């Protein structure tokens, strides 16, 4: 075991592990001025310009290397894949408030087990639901209006022109693995890229197919939802069709392992100059009533994920107007004031349009628009 040591100090900087990556840099800019920042990663020299911009300090922490990392921090946000749970373990040992945004479902389940065994002395927020926990947060906000959630159905439009970091397409490695979800209260095994639908997400019709995401594991536990589904599609219709065809042909089942990893990631990781992040979340309440929220961020998926991480950081620090959390395991949708979520997103430049299909209200009449220019 690595001798990593994080010591909790409420006056010390907030540690962003991976704080100068694509998402980390967005979070650093949003968090600058609120708290002093410490950015950690394998190559601190790459953070020089960002440190000058934000007033942060950068230190080396190579999660794949043997060198231990020591620091006094007020909280830690993990923004990189951490296969050995080094960051989480160090935070647990030091009683440091912790959140992360990079786990797929199996790794979140492992983190749940680890955190439960360690009996945390500080809040541990596992916020790896889609876009840094934005999906489960919004689901909780809609469920609060409806008096509960019987089902949650999410559809994601992935803009291939958007900026993305290498870690953001790690879910490609899960496209060859069946996963378990709850449907109508029963455990069901689902194959990725199946059960396609075509939906309007924002202003675009998008073909979407099933994908494994952590909120399909957590929302039945936290909101009591009997059915939770997440689907994804791409801004390019031909790319969506090609991906689904590859899935049906068994490509992702057979092209596993490190040998095929570069090819798998090239299918999606071709980051452009920027795009719009868009997703649609429909929550059906205990009766026949339902609400649908369309979330759009013109600054793209990296910014939207960073917003989710920022809200998670504010939650573990008790800096969001809600009661400070007690030590222990948390999920984004466990927020004590879900009615504040849409306004919090708006304050960070994210637009939410909420509609009730069974009523006469138009989407714009329930919109929460950004309070400042995005």
Image (spheres, grey):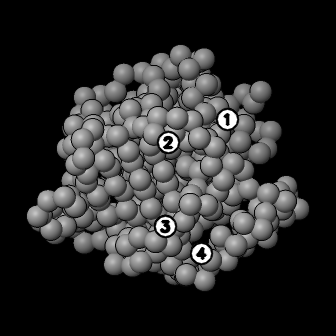
**Residue 235 can be seen, yes or no:** yes
- The residue at the point 48 percent across, 50 percent down is 229
Check residue 183 in the rendering and tell me which mark sits there, or answer none.
Answer: 2
Identify the secondary structure beneath mark 3.
strand
Q: What whole-number distance in Å separates the C-alpha atoms at marks 3 and 2? A: 17 Å
Asked where in the image residue 279 lies, by quadrant, the reply is: bottom left
Establish if 118 lies above or below 343.
Answer: above
Foreground tag (2 vs 4):
2
Establish if 48 lies above or below 123.
Answer: below
Q: Are marks 3 and 1 in contact (CB under 8 Å)?
A: no
Q: Of label 3 and label 1, which has the lower sequence position?
A: 1
Circle 3 sits on which residue?
Answer: 197
- The residue at the point 30 percent across, 47 percent down is 284
Q: Of label 4 and label 3, which has the lower sequence position?
A: 3
Q: Is residue 200 left or right of residue 171?
A: left
Q: Foreground: 148 or 22?
A: 148
Q: What whole-number distance in Å separates the C-alpha atoms at marks 4 and 3? A: 12 Å
Check residue 255 in the rendering and tell me which mark sits there, or answer none.
Answer: none
Give x and y (percent) for residue 332. 40, 40
Q: Of label 3 and label 2, which has the lower sequence position?
A: 2
**Residue 6 can be seen, yes or no:** no
- The residue at the point 42 percent across, 21 percent down is 327
Circle 4 sits on which residue?
Answer: 240
Check residue 86 in the rendering and tell me which mark sits there, or answer none.
Answer: 1
Q: Is residue 152 left or right of residue 243?
A: left
Q: Of label 4 and label 1, which has the lower sequence position?
A: 1
Identify the secondary structure beneath mark 2.
strand
Foreground tag (2 vs 1):
2
**Badge count:** 4
């Amino acid at each position: 075991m690595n001798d990593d040591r994080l010591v909790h100090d409420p006056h010390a900087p907030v540690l962003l592990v991976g704080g100068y990556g694509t998402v980390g840099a967005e979070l650093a800019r949003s968090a600058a001025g609120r708290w002093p920042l410490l950015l950690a990663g394998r190559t601190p020299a790459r953070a020089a310009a960002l440190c000058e911009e934000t007033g942060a300090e950068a230190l080396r922490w190579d999660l794949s290397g043997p060198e231990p990392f020591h620091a006094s921090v007020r909280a830690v946000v993990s923004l990189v894949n951490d296969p050995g749970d080094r960051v989480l373990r160090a935070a647990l040992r030091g009683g440091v408030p912790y959140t992360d945004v990079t786990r797929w479902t199996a790794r979140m389940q492992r983190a749940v087990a680890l955190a439960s065994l360690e009996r945390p002395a500080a809040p541990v927020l596992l916020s790896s639901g889609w876009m840094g926990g934005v999906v489960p947060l919004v689901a909780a906000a809609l469920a609060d209006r409806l008096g509960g959630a019987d089902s949650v159905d999410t559809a994601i439009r992935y803009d291939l022109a958007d900026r993305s970091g290498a870690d953001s397409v790690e879910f490609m490695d899960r496209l060859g693995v069946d996963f378990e979800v709850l449907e109508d209260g029963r455990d069901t095994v689902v194959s990725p890229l199946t059960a396609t639908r075509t939906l309007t997400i924002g202003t675009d019709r998008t073909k979407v197919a099933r994908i494994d995401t952590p909120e399909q594991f957590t929302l039945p536990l936290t909101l009591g939802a009997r059915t939770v589904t997440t689907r994804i599609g791409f801004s390019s219709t031909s790319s969506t069709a090609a991906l689904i065809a590859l899935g049906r042909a068994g490509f992702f089942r057979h092209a596993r392992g490190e040998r095929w990893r570069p090819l798998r990631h090239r299918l999606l990781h071709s980051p452009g100059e920027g795009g719009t992040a868009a997703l649609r979340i429909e929550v059906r309440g205990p009766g026949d009533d339902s609400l649908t929220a369309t979330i759009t961020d013109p600054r793209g998926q990296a910014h939207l994920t960073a917003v989710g991480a920022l809200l998670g950081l504010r939650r573990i620090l008790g800096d969001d107007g809600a009661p400070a959390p007690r030590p222990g395991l948390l999920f984004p949708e466990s927020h004590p004031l879900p009615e504040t979520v849409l306004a919090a997103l708006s304050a960070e430049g994210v637009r939410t349009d909420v509609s009730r299909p069974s009523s006469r209200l138009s989407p714009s009449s329930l919109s929460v628009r950004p309070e400042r220019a995005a």
